[in-house]
Image (cartoon, rainbow, N blue to C red):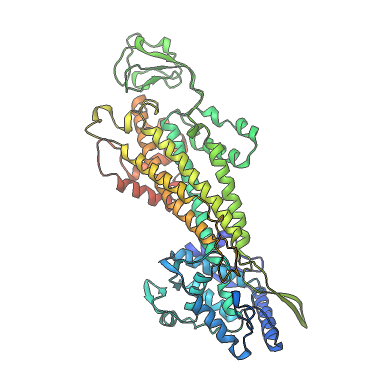
Amino acid sequence: MTKTIVLKVKGLSHEDVCNIVRNNYQLTLSEPVKKKIRLARKAIEISVESGQKVYGITTGFGSLRDIVIREKDAEQLQINLIRSHSVAVGEPAKDEQVKAMMVLRVTALARGNSGCQLSTVENLIAMINDNVLPIIPSKGSVGASGDLAQLSHMALTMIGDGHNNLKYKGKIYDAKDGLKKAGIPITKLSYKEGLALNNGVQYSAGIACMAIKDSYNLLENSLIALALTMEALKAAKQQFDERIHLARNHPGQIAIARKIRAFYKGSKLVKIYGDVYTCPEEFCGYYYDSEMGDSNRGIKEWTLFEDLPEDWTCPKCGLVKNTFIKTLPKLQDDYSIRCSPQVLGPISDVMDNTRTILSREINAATDNPLIFIKREDPLEFDIFSGGNFHGEPIAIAMDHLAIAMAELGNIAERRCAKLVDGSRNEGLGAFLIHREALGLNSGFMMPQYVTAALASENKVLASPASIDSIPTSANAEDHVSMSPIAARKVVAINENLVYIIAIEMMLAAQGVDLRCQIQSLTPKDALGDKTFKAYQFIRSIIPVLTHDRIIYTDIEKLAKKIIDGSIVKSIS
């Protein structure tokens, strides 16, 4: 049964928006919201009848704000506004970005500060509920006065104008024909309604809402990849002791360290290491750990090396006991592992802050001018011009998020490099393939190239958009935010990041297999409860690599499971 979300005076949550967009929850207005919309509309009608000069209602727009429009032309003014401003270019925005934009435009109008007709809002809701989606070019907004171009394209479809610009049930229609097919009335714009529909940053905010949702999913997947890498590289767990992270007292760092501990809990590979005895044979990698013993030879756990039979030999290569080298306890790992809470913690904090900002923006009135009801009966109100359409809050937040997500890829790439480096991967061998197969086979040499390329591209994309501004509208709009560019960059970074994480998971799973072979353990016995579940899921999709084969299909399979959240669900 389809679920319905009622838009109340307090507005929608971020999760509400995501459910409407991705899970097709239906949207409807509460009666108090309808009342607010009607009161604001009445205020507009009174203003027009009184002959007041009000920006965008009885005047032109932007630098034409001082030209007074005759009353008989006021309605045509709104139609002209939408037609003249529908100038976006480039590839179409994604359907979910368009739908999110439409939902946020409804929440803005529902504030009761815009003055549109209730029927206009209800027509927009009908389009949302039936997935009647405008086809909107992705480029052409500077994020002030809002996302004029994209929102105008949305409004253009609502008034039944434009060609091949409406999508419904998998087919593309002229707006007029598509609305008729869906049974949705053509919207007849009246005073102020063009501005009410196109003046705001809902395109930027819509992209941002979906991007932050995806960012949280990517962080969770990256933590799983990290935990598997730690298993493969037999990381020292004392680095994640809660006391270390409480000593610095950053909430994100503390929370990330706690999650990492939960992932490897129960592991025989991630632990506090004592003295171990390492086989000296190059590329062997085996070490005797008294805590593990050697169950295949009947050596019980906690059997000291000194107490092993004199004829005991390396389970992997056969070297005799007296050739083994005593190795001091492993105290710490390289920064990409040891400092992961200190790096991923701030990333988590940035994500939380970004979601807080977007949660405010979801329910913001962002057009201009705005109507403020002072008294209902008799109706008293103010109409003021302001600048809530400026996208700077979104632009700066998304620039911060872009940097954070690029960093998530940077540190993951370093772990990928460590996994394939035979001199740094704790005996797993070069490129994670058996020594005897090297040369004829390249193993996992190339996937790390890909992560390097993607991480480098993300660094370029992380350059802030909000520090740029080019004046528009004959310098009347002399500072703009570039918020849609900031938001689109995060989407591009996240698309690259999916593949970086997928590759780390693939390499880490291979590392786990090799580690278990070296130590004569099964993954079930060796891994923590959650890391084993993740390993199992990965191995259900892609097999272990024994010789060179086509790898890109494996990467794509994992990427799809990261995007749909399957890997995160597999460990819950």
Left or right of 175, for residue 38? right
Q: For the point 34% across and 18% down, which residue is it?
A: 297
Residue 254, above or below 172: above
Q: Where is residue 268 in the image (x, y as percent from the top left)?
A: 45, 28
- From the viewer's side, name the closer residue of 101 and 235: 101
Q: In which quarter of the image is residue 308?
A: top left
Left or right of 408, for residue 545? left
Q: For the point 62% across and 89% down, which residue is it?
A: 70
Q: Where is residue 209 in the image (x, y as percent from the top left)?
A: 53, 59
Q: Position of residue 472 (x, y in %)?
A: 55, 68
Q: Does residue 534 appear anywhere in the picture?
A: yes
Q: For the point 58% across and 88% down, which residue is it?
A: 73
Q: Quadrant of residue 436?
A: top left
Outermost residue, front side: 474
Q: Does residue 12 appear anywhere in the picture?
A: no
Residue 342, above or below 113: above
Outermost residue, bottom side: 72
Outermost residue, left side: 440
Q: Position of residue 512 (x, y in %)?
A: 38, 33
Residue 542, above or below 123: above
- From the viewer's side, name the closer residue of 128 and 443: 443
Total numbered circles: 0
- From the viewer's side, name the closer residue of 390 and 94: 390
